[in-house]
Amino acid sequence: MTQDWRGIFSLKEAGVYYALLILLFILAAIASSRGLPPYLGGENLGNIAYQASLVGIMGVAMTVMLITGAFDLSVGSVAALSAAVLVGLAGSIGAFPAAIAALCTAAAIGLLNGAIVQFIGINAFIVTLGTLTAVRGLVLILTGGRSLMVENPQVLAELLTFESTRVPVFWAAIAVAVVLVAIGVAKRRPIRIAAAAVIAGLAILAGPNYAVAAPVIYLAIFTTVMWAILRHTVIGRRLYAVGGNAEAARLSGINVHTYKMGAFVLSGTAAGFAGVLFGSRLGAINPTALQGSELTVIAAAILGGTSLFGGAGSVVKTVVGALLLFTLTNGFNILNLGANYQGLIEGVVVIGAAAIYTVGGRRRARPLSLNAAPASSAASEEPAS
Amino acid sequence: MVTDPILQLEGVTKTFPNGTVALRGVDLAIRSGTVHGLLGANGAGKSTLIKILSGALSATDGTIRWKGEPVNWSHPRDPRRAGVATIYQHIPLVPTLSALENILLDQPGWKRERAQDRRRVADVVARLGNPFALDELAGDLPIGARQMIVIAQSLASGAELVVMDEPTASLATEERETVYAIIRSLAREDGKAILFVSHFLDEIVSLTDEVTVLRDGRAVLHAPTETLDEAAIAEAIAGRAVTVVERGDNRPAPGGTVLEIDRLASPGRLAPTRFLLRKGEVLGIAGTLGSGRSELLHAIFGSDPAASGEIRLDGQVIGRYPDEAVAAGIALVPEDRSAQGYVPQLSLAQNIGLAALGQRRTHSLLLDENAERASATTAIERLAIKAPGPDALVTELSGGNAQKAVIAKWLTPETRVLLLDEPTAGIDIGARTDILRLVRQLADDGLPVILVSSEFEELLAIADRILVMRDGAVVCEADPKQASEADLTLMAGGSRKQQAGANA
């Protein structure tokens, strides 16, 4: 198995990991120089992951969406609608049925988005911009413009359990690390072993009694499942093919409509799940909740190097992108760095990341064709011949 | 007529920053009033040379003299100002602007539409025989007319040397004839110098005055055209004697019927068509661009949603969507390999494995990457695809090798009928011969093939039967053992009256 080490550790491939590490160490250095409690402690890192979990879940689905070459601006509104359905129905039909109803509503909106995009042929940007507004309107209608909350204390307790339980992760993390080492050794993938070392290191740093909030676990499971589907299954390959060149995929016998619509349904459902978590957090929803979160979700995917033109992207890097954004937010709050600067810095980070991916992508094309002895001179000619 | 060359290259070399040497010292002299042919296999350095002439790349070493003066062109505007216009194979027009505005795109000035510009352009276009209306949107015009727009653009800018990079590769026969006529009149009557790049030996022989052949970054042949024939040029290109596949007649007789096409039609594109395809047979479809030949293949493959009719494979009716056709074992190699054939972000192995994803139905959902790479490696060897390995990107390969990759993806045991739409368009003669041999071999091994081609000699060489199409209908059937290229051209492109005569 040959590994292209320069490629794997290049800014383009691994930039988002470097950025997160550098940011964490800068913030840690500032925290320690001011005599604040240790920034890199388990408590704070768990908080960042918890704050990033909703955007992370939506971001993973958004990445799949972007891989297929489409776009979903409606996730913030859909999540709010899902939360409103949950909070509105939980009192009368119970927490679990209400959560199912909320997920179904969100999936139905995803299906509607997908059907309009695929069968009428309107650009996804326009369709989901429409549903962004329309679904927000639906939330206002459902809530009557006021905050809703769950009155029944027993149902409220169920919701809180679902969202706020803290799950001890020490042994789970050790187990994951062991499995990764085993796979890494068996298949000679040093990257797996490195990832295992990072996980084990964090677990030991945090201690055996360390626990994280449930949404972090949901995010981790969802990311792992989607990563495995994209990386190791035929479905994943087809999703990349559909986004990379829909016509070539269609003429290779792939049902392009199914995969594109599937991505919309997944995106809607993931937004619905994020909404369920959001509604469960407080047992209440106000009609402007999660407004603008769709842009944070897309920013996370871009930070993770997902192409807006389809055919490329990684869910793991999107999650790291979400962590990066929330580390910025968290750092500004904890260190009291002046919240007014936050938006400016976040925007610069997103554009900077996109610039690195674009420029890095151009540079990378050359050294690769160097190995292509017979085809090398033809490589640059293919567009003309 | 020995005049001083308008453009002269002496020892031009080009080394890319990564160390790839594209040109190793090329001498080239182009004279006004002549058509100069430039040939070479994919990767021989033609495109690099053209990019240097157009200012898109600058030469590493060597001298370029324009009208005797050494010049150093480092930006596309430099040669354009000097009077060199370059016409690329893929025409960079703005589809949402009119033909006129496209022609005036590179002209200076402030005002968008000036009457004097319009008159000037109208004159130029009239000299070309008015192939398009000035106010029509470029995107609405057929590809031949778009080619004319670019030629008009180069004339309107007052070019003295016109570099044409395979201007006829995507044109049908009549459109080619028009382009040839224009090129001849530009050279003979207007005294322009033309550098004409092509893969087609016949057009080089009939059109050009001088020929230069590049191989591995060197000019290996430079001679007046009248001293050469196609075989000599082909030998210079390949560095060895080559022939396009010779017709062999001792092949097994086709077996039983595999595919039945019945009342297959598509409104406005394809008149009701029926024919049979037998085991081990290559059925050639001869027709010019727009004759309905690609439409026929797409109707069979189910990728034309408006098509109606019945397709039976071994007596089983197959569905009307591409995924159903693929699952049944029908394979299509589409005409435009970059737009329809491969996924640029995926590796060579992944692209070759793409068809297998659609063909297998209920097996495991898990990808077996090792098996995929192994079968891709086999295919790469079998088709002699020149690539660094199965993990290379298809976009890094030359046109001929990318085309082989698109064909390779269908070489699975599940493929039962192979449809090929212009598989040899725009690729060099070596790859072309490889592909034609492969197609014949596949058919001899029992796979029925439908081959669409504008190169009638290819059909005559490897087809068992030829259907001639025109205006969306099959007009007659030809026997490749008896018909000649001229017969097919007449049947496919002659007027209706001649047609009746040819049939009688």
Image (spheres, coloured by chain):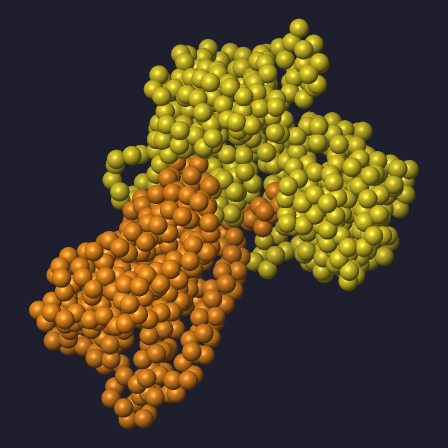
Chain colours: A orange, B yellow
The residue lying toward the viewer, choosing from B425 and B349, is B425
Residue B389, given in percent of the width and then of the height, sits at: 44, 45
Residue A206, given in percent of the width and then of the height, sits at: 18, 77
Please give the name of the residue rendered at 41% of the width and 43% of the height, measured from the top-left corner.
A119
**In this picture, is A161 found above or below B78?**
below
* Placement of the C terminus of chain B among the 4 image quadrants: top right
**In this picture, is B210 found above or below B5?**
above
The residue lying toward the viewer, choosing from B162 and A134, is A134
**In this picture, is A106 found above or below A37?**
above
- Residue B44 seen in the current view: no
Please give the name of the residue rendered at 64% of the width and 49% of the height, measured from the top-left corner.
B96
Residue B194, given in percent of the width and then of the height, sits at: 79, 42
Q: Is residue B408 left or right of residue A54?
A: right
Task: Spot the residue most to the left.
Answer: A154
Count of picture labels: 0
* Placement of the N terminus of chain B among the 4 image quadrants: top right
Please give the name of the residue rendered at 39% of the width and 87% of the height, measured from the top-left corner.
A338
